[in-house]
Image (tube, coloured by chain):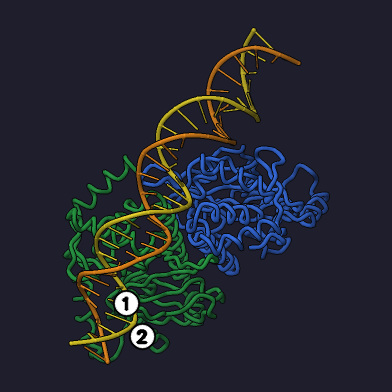
Chain colours: A green, B blue, C yellow, D orange
DNA sequence: CGCGATCTTGATTCATCTCAAAATGCGTGG
DNA sequence: CCACGCATTTTGAGATGAATCAAGATCGCG
């Protein structure tokens, strides 16, 4: 929950990846050499099991703004995120769209596919994205053989639920400034180790916090003025974590 | 999602219950005779399996306002709701409390117990409550023997996630009036067949919609004036569904 | 270089909060 | 059964945060 946890994009993991990959050669895709292997779904498997996976798993690259899948589409696979950031969003019956949560490297999205349901939300790439497609049948079979996998799946469901509940409690109550500060804190979980984070377009901030584009813009401008954040470019910012945390503490009382 | 689905508290289910219960006698608790047997966790089991359950399952009665469990408590059991309504809530780091979702007859709450985690939220009785306590070890053992149970559990996790996402999209965006109308729609899912629903205290409505007590009171007063609802007593109301739906349709455009 | 999309900024309006007080409901003890 | 007191609800008036409406400014791109 706190920024110091930068394991999501740790340099160590990348190093291990390229190291292992040498044996398989640079082209062949190997699950044993996956940069997110430890956090990902098959983390419980041994090398022998992992070696048999790649035949069934296909990699995919997605451009920012493109959908990995859409709500109500029949769901035949779940996806593990190798690299990049996804937002899960639904459109409300009122017409607006609402971002439900984010997912990053090591996360598994589209769990509902495993139950034969249609997708519950749109999954849209925030940044350039690399994912692995895990067909439902594969997971079904492996789950039957390996009970530990089922337990891992249940943990992931619980984690998703937890995350949704956090968005409900921390990102959709309180005044707009508080919610914006909480969003920055959340984004810092997916940031580079040096503190640079991906900054959503103003309209997307709006869909995350339920504010208008204008308000999102004003909030960002204010926090930049206060030195809580500074732009690298329009889509990336550097956070001053102590100030962010101080601003959050201040925002508790008044709001 | 729509009021006509009143299966949650259908008279049929109750009739089946009392019918089956005759054999076991009125005192002994029998899972085969449970009023929510078909919707509940062990719905997939046959009579023989069900007969062995009661030894491990204890029934519990809870008064309105009392907690079934509290967030961060170690969780050793999940609960099936036999009768009554529960609200799941968390307190935000800002100090407020926020209702995450509701659970009613046939629902399973406290799923996180099965993963050895602490409880993720407070579970508080809205109405007089009857629940069955399902110890973690029981579910673990049965799950190992009966894979269909694991699948059912995953479905429940997904259902909870779905519900949380619905609260995010429909109950925490849009103006207060829209959210209030959506809440009534949601409450109608747990209503009596005749259209009477349980109406939360104004402060609880506030925690569900993220509004103040005063605003909650004004919203209720306005909808009563418009004939969308009328009080039976302070805690129960009768909905005029056609008007409710009409009001929702109108609220889409302007907001 | 120019054009559409996105972002910023300002002025005004409106919804909801805040503060305050009265009304009602509800349990308790006389 | 009534009188009391506390909690909840209702209602009002004023303050305020965010939406809306309306221009500009900047960015990305052909």
Q: Position of residue A87 (x, y in %)?
A: 38, 70
Q: Quadrant of residue B156?
A: bottom right
- Residue at which label 1 appears: A82
Circle 2 marks a residue in which chain? A
Q: At x 41% / y 80%, what residue is drawn?
A: A68
Image quadrant containing the N terminus of chain B: bottom right
Q: Which quadrant of the figure has residue A21?
A: bottom left
Give the class, few, some or many, for how many residues have Cα within 10 Å of label 2's Cα (few <14, many ≥20). some
Q: Count all numbered tags in the image, as a single digit.
A: 2
On screen, D20 above or below A75?
Answer: above
Q: Residues within 10 Å of mark 1 (few under 14, many from 20)?
A: many
- Residue B184 visible here: yes
Q: Is residue A178 left or right of residue B243?
A: left
Image spot of residue A216 (x, y percent): 32, 61
**Circles 1, 2 touching at the beta carbon (< 8 Å):** yes
- The answer to whether B69 appears left or right of A40 in the picture is right
Where residue C16 sits in the image (x, y, percent)? 46, 47
Q: Secondary structure at mark 1?
A: strand
Report helix, strand or loop for mark 2.
Answer: strand
State the residue position of label 2.
A59
Q: Quadrant of residue A45 in the image? A: bottom left
């Amino acid at each position: 929950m706190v920024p110091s946890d930068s394991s999501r994009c740790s340099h160590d993991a990348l190093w291990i990846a390229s190291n292992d990959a040498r044996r398989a050669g640079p082209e062949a895709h190997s699950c044993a050499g996956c940069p997110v292997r430890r956090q990902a779904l098959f983390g419980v498997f041994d090398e022998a099991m992992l070696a048999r996976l790649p035949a069934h798993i296909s990699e995919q690259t997605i451009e920012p703004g493109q959908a990995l899948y859409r709500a109500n589409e029949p769901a035949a696979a779940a996806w593990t995120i190798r690299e990049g950031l996804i937002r899960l969003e639904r459109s409300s019956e009122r017409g607006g769209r609402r971002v439900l949560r984010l997912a990053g490297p090591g996360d598994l999205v589209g769990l509902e596919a495993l139950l034969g349901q249609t997708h519950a939300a749109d999954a849209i790439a925030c940044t350039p994205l690399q994912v692995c497609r895990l067909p439902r049948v594969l997971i079904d079979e492996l789950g039957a053989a390996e009970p530990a996998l089922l337990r891992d799946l249940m943990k992931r469901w619980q984690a998703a639920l937890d995350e949704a509940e956090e968005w409900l409690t921390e990102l959709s109550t309180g005044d707009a400034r508080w919610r914006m500060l909480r969003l920055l804190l959340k984004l810092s979980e997916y940031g580079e180790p040096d503190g640079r984070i991906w900054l959503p377009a103003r309209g997307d901030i709006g869909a995350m916090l339920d504010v208008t584009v204008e308000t999102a813009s004003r909030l960002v401008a204010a926090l930049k003025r206060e030195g809580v954040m500074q732009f690298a470019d329009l889509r990336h910012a550097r956070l001053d974590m102590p100030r962010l945390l101080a601003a959050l503490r201040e925002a508790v009382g008044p709001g």
